[in-house]
Amino acid sequence: MSKMRIQKMLAEVGVASRRTIEEMIGEGRITVNGKLVVALPCFVEPDTDTIHVDGELVATATGPKRYFLLNKPKDVVCTSNDPRQRTRAIDCIPSIGDRVYCVGRLDADSTGLILLTNDGELTQHLTHPKYGVIKTYVALIDGQLTGEKVEQFKKGVWLDGHRTAGAMIRVLKRTPKSSLLQIRLTEGRNREIRRVLARLGHKVRRLHRSAIGPLTDRGMAVSDWRELSANEVEQLRTAGGFVSRKQPTRKTTVKKTGRATVKRAERATAKTTERAGVKKTKRATAKKTGRVKKASASRPPSKRPATGRGAKPRPGAKKHTRKRGPAPKRSARRRR
């Protein structure tokens, strides 16, 4: 495969837009074969060059796409390069054979589902908040989470100068010393759930991701992994979640307008039906009283008018003629 511009190649695999990639290069966040990219243009070979963004390996090979689902155990990291030499998620899948990377992250203390792939387009779909793909978590925390704090979590909490997006949260179980929660959200900032709950005054004992969109951990023990089927990949591509509070309410406006139009149409239809019913009732009443005129079967109706100058006299009727009087006398004019 021929070489191509690095910003175009990274945009095609779903890392970011071309303009954002140019900004990342200016910030010194991208390396090619271990060397920092400091200027543009920069051309790369997707099948042979190794590219890292923020220390993470980017899958750029043009070979077949691979998709793996791992139920990550504790003390396993999702990075490609770990300075502390801890076990990586990719190490849990033996003989993987292809350059794949984790979609999103789970911190080392958390367990649950993590997707590994070399499909950049799908990665962009699953990680960008605008697509609304829901990730489901189960958290065990210290203390009882009150209804007021649940509403705060749903509306969003300020972290590092930014407010978190709305989440769906449900209390599964309460005890005097702990609460079991189900949390569903569409964005995944660094340790977001732990930091939000800490802001609300609760420490997380255990955190487990139980679902990514339509995929769940049902039937998968800790450390189990499997390759996704074509049907499951298609489900991920079409997955979407709830509309957050920050998104425009264009759909709601359309629904309101549609309802008003439907109501107007219903009123017009009701009026038309009512009028038709009145006419039908009048006809039925006239029919019962014998007021409806029926055409004679023996004599077809005449096309000539019944009255007027062109009317045809009835058979046996007398012909009325107007009698004229004597003509008036004309006065003789004198001749001069």
Image: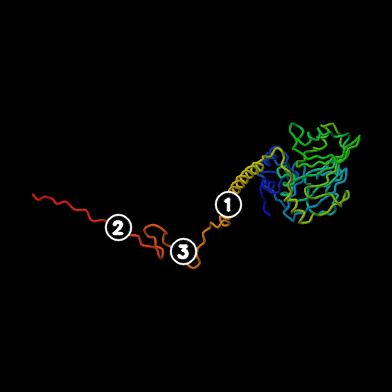
What residue is drawn where x is 82% and y is 40%? 170
Of 279 and 206, nearer the camera is 279
Of 112 and 253, nearer the camera is 253
For mark 2, what is the residue?
323
Disc marking residue 276: 1
Of 139 and 322, nearer the camera is 322
Q: Nearer the viewer, mark 1 or mark 2?
A: 2
Q: Nearer the viewer, mark 3 or mark 2?
A: 2
Q: Position of residue 9 (x, y in %)?
A: 68, 48
Q: Are marks 1 and 2 in contact (CB under 8 Å)?
A: no
Q: Earlier in the sequence, mark 1 or mark 2?
A: 1
The residues bearing labels 3 and 2 have C-alpha atoms spaced at a distance of 33 Å
What residue is drawn where x is 77% and y is 37%? 154
Which secondary structure, mark 2? loop
**What type is the residue that disc 2 sits on?**
Lys
Q: Position of residue 132 (x, y in %)?
A: 73, 44
Whether residue 322 is situated above or below residue 134 in the rendered picture: below
The residues bearing labels 1 and 2 have C-alpha atoms spaced at a distance of 53 Å
Label 2 Cα crowd, 10 Å radius (few <14 / some 14-19 / many 20+): few
For mark 3, what is the residue?
301
Q: Position of residue 146 (x, y in %)?
A: 84, 33
Q: Position of residue 240 (x, y in %)?
A: 73, 47
Which secondary structure, mark 3? loop
What residue is drawn where x is 72% and y is 54%? 62
What residue is drawn where x is 57% and y is 57%? 287
Label 1 Cα crowd, 10 Å radius (few <14 / some 14-19 / many 20+): few
